[in-house]
Amino acid sequence: MNFKRYISTLILACLWAIAGLGVVSAQSAASLNVTGAAFTRCSDSIIEGSFGVTALDSGGGIINSSTAISATVYAVSNSGGYASDSWSYVAGSSVAFAFSFPGSLSYADLFVQFDAARSDTYRFGCDGTITRFGGGGGADARLNYGHGDLISALYSASDADGHPTIRVYDIAPDSTGILRGDYAYELFEPYINNPPSVNTYLGKLGRTTLTVLTSGEFQINVGPDAEGKIHEVILKGIPPVSIKFSSYLQ
C-alpha cells in the first residue's frame, strides 16, 4: 500500500477538490453506497477497518454485481494527515483497508470515489464508533443503508405540519416495504437539547424500537435478524445530522 504522508494543507485541499473528477471506467456510476462498515483496530498512527461498495447506474441498477470496480478511497485524519488508495469492490462483499497518518490519531473520515459518483463520508473512530455524514449521493435515502435495512428501513420524513419524523418500513421476504408508521416529532421534541438522566424507551414500530439516550442522541434498534443480531442506529438531532452504527448478538 502506498501512503501519502505529511501532505501540506494546500495540497490536501486541492486533492479533495479534484476527487469529484472520478476515474475513467467502462460503465458509468451515478451513485455509491457503502455497506457493512466495520472497525478493526486503531493504533497511534494506523486505523484499520472494512466495508463494501455498491455502485449503481442512473436507473438504480447495480453495476458491480459480478464485475469488480476499482474505486478510490480518500481519508483525512483528525491530525490533518491525508491518504488515499484504490481497491476492487464487488457488491455484497467487504474489503479491508488500512491507512497510516502522522500525529496522534483519534479518527479518520473516509469516502469512496468512482467515476463522477462519491459516497457519503464515514468517520471511523478509534473508540470503535462509525458515524455516517452526508456529502455523497446514495441511490436510496434510507438512514440505515447496509445496517439492518433488510429487516427495517428508516427514512427521514415529515408530518403534515412540516415537523421532522423518522419513517419505518419493515422489509417483507419479497423485498417490498411495509409501512409501519412514523416516529412522531412529539416523541423527540421534549429531549431536544434536554437529555434525560437515564436512557428512556420512547416507542416501537414494526421490528424497531426507539430510545433516547443520556447523551441526547436517539437510538433505534432494528431486529433481531435471522442470526439473532440487533442493529443499533444512533441519531444525533432530528432530522439527523450524523448517524452511528453498531450491532450485537442477543
Image (cartoon, rainbow, N blue to C red):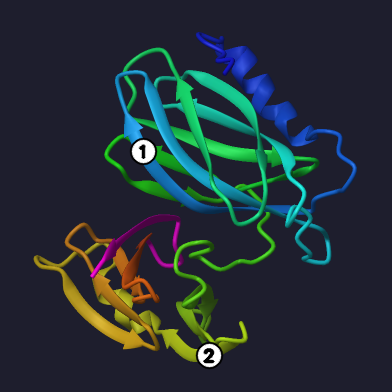
The residue identified by callout 1 is 40
Which class describes the residues within 10 Å of circle 2: few (<14), some (14-19), or many (20+)?
Answer: some
Quadrant position of the C terminus in the picture = bottom left
Quadrant of the snapshot with the N terminus: top right
Does the magenta run of residues contain 246?
A: yes
Percent across and percent down for residue 209 are 31, 80
**Secondary structure of residue under mark 1:** strand
Amino acid carrying label 2: it is Leu
| Residue positioned 28% across, 62% down in the render | 248
Examine the residues drawn in magenta and state their main secondary structure.
strand
Residue at coordinates 55% horizontally, 15% vertically from top-left? 3
Q: Nearer the viewer, residue 37 or 165?
A: 37
Picture residue at 53% right of the left edge, 29% below the top = 75
Q: Which span of residues is magenta-colored?
A: 236-250
Q: Which mark is residue 179?
A: 2
Amino acid type at image mark 1: Thr
